[in-house]
Amino acid sequence: MEGMDALQISLTASDKALRQFTTALNGLSEAESAAKLGEHSLSPNEMTLHLAECRAAVMAQIAGQEHEWGTFQPAEGEAPTAALERMQGEAKAAAAAAADPAKAAEVVMDYMALHDAYHVGQLVTYRLTCQPEWDHYSIYR
């Protein structure tokens, strides 16, 4: 598979996983978005910002740099979902402009598509714990 083909597949997979994540977020109250299931788990807001930071890591990796985890901060007044949406666009643009599309494809798949899918599962579990009547199949629509 050519590098550009692999990159397009990775970006498409990332978009799909992110859509599932945001579908699972939609409908949570402000309190539910800030709450945690356990002491060591992430709240939905924290998960969202973590995924935004993963996009910063993608951009660093594509540029041949290491990302320092825990340094990402949303813009002042920026909601977690807005930060994630902004960073998704920036990371996709960086990947599309990468000198090595095959490397960019690998980084996007690892830090965005596959990692997002992991957090989709966490968020669906959280959502069902808070709202047992929630339709978990809605992430596929």
Image (spheres, helix red, strand yellow):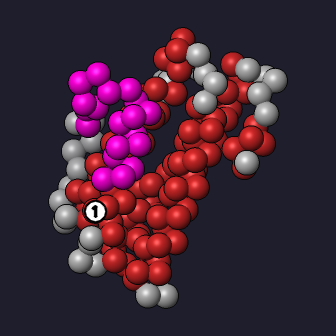
For label 1, the crowd category at 10 Å Cα-Cα, with few meaning under 14, some 14 to 19 and many 20 or more, is: some
132 is higher (above) or lower (below) than 57: above
Is residue 116 among what the camera can see? yes
The span picked out in magenta is 72-90
Q: For residue 55: magenta?
A: no
* Percent of width and height locating residue 57: 29, 52
Residue 123 falls in image quadrant = top right
Q: Residue at x 28, y 62 (%)?
A: 94
* Percent of width and height locating residue 124: 67, 35
* Percent of width and height locating residue 10: 48, 67
Q: Residue at x 37, y 64 (%)?
A: 107
Residue 46 falls in image quadrant = top left
Q: Residue at x 52, y 72 (%)?
A: 9
Q: Which residue is mark 1?
A: 94
Q: Residue furthest top?
A: 31
Residue 119 falls in image quadrant = top right
SS at mark 1 in the image? helix
Q: Residue furthest right?
A: 133
Q: Nearer the viewer, residue 43 or 83?
A: 83
Is residue 39 among what the camera can see? no
Amino acid residing under circle 1: Ala
